[in-house]
Image (tube, rainbow, N blue to C red):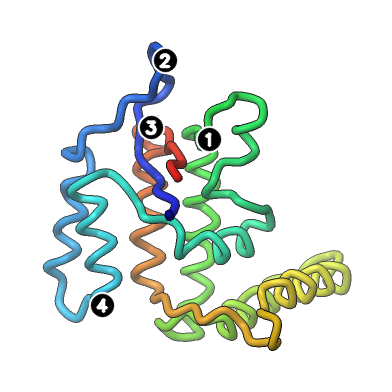
Amino acid sequence: MGLDNVAVVWPRTGRFYDPVAPAEFVDFGEIVEMPRISAPTAALAELIAKTGTVRATAYTELVDLLLGLENVLYATENAAEDEDPVIDPDGCAWIADGLERFVARHREHGESVTFDSVSAVLRDLLADGRLAEQQLRWLDSRLDGLRDEAGDPPQWNFTCAELAVLAAFYRRCADRSFAVYAAT
C-alpha cells in the first residue's frame, strides 16, 4: 500500500476532512498537453487534475532529504499530537518552497534528477553555508543512509519538470488554504 497526499478543506469541520473538489486543480491537465513532457510528469499532472491527489510514495525519500526531516509527506509530526496525519497550509508552503528552490538550483545540472545530481546540488548548496563542514558531514550520513545493503543508491529517475509539478500541487494547496491529508 502506498502513500497518497490528498488536498482537503482546512480546517476540518466535523469529524472528517472533506476532499477538495478536483475542479480546483483542473488546470494541471494542461500540462499533459505540453510538447515533450515526460510520461511520469504527465501522469502526475493528470492525476492531480482529476483527483486533487498526489501518489507520494515515490517522492518521500527525496523530499525528506531535501527538507532535512523524516516522513514529511506522511505528516508524522502532526499524527502524534492531532491524531490526524495532515500537512496544514503553512506546511504545504514550506514543502513547495523547498521543492521550488531545489528545482531552480538543479537546472544547471540538467533536467534529469538522480541520486548523484541531488547529491551534487545539495553539496553545492551546503558548501556555501556558515557551518559547511558540519552540514556536509550530515549530508554524507543522510546519503549513506539511503543506500541499500550492497551500497547502491536509490534509483531515482525524476525530472525537474515532474518535481515542479509536485511543488505546484503543494503551492496550490498553500495559496488556497487547503491542507493535505496523508492517506496510507
Tell me the tag on residue 160: none
Residue 64 position in % (x across, y down):
61, 59
For residue 105, above or below residue 51: below
Q: Does the residue at mark 1 contact the one at mark 3 (Cβ under 8 Å)? A: no
Residue neighbourhood size for the residue with mark 1, other residues' Cα within 10 Å, grouped as few (<14), some (14–19), many (≥20): many
Specify whether 118 is left or right of 27.
Answer: right
CA separation in Å, label 1 and label 4: 31 Å
Tell me the tag on residue 38: 4
Task: Tell me the residue that label 1 is attached to.
Answer: 85
Task: Tell me the residue that label 2 is attached to.
Answer: 15
CA separation in Å, label 4 and label 3: 28 Å
Residue 26 position in % (x across, y down):
16, 46
CA separation in Å, label 1 and label 2: 14 Å
Kind of residue sitting beneath label 4: Ser
Task: Tell me the residue that label 3 is attached to.
Answer: 178
Instruction: Point out the tag, 3 or 2, that comes first from the N-terminus.
Output: 2
Residue shown at 34% from the left, 43% from the top: 172
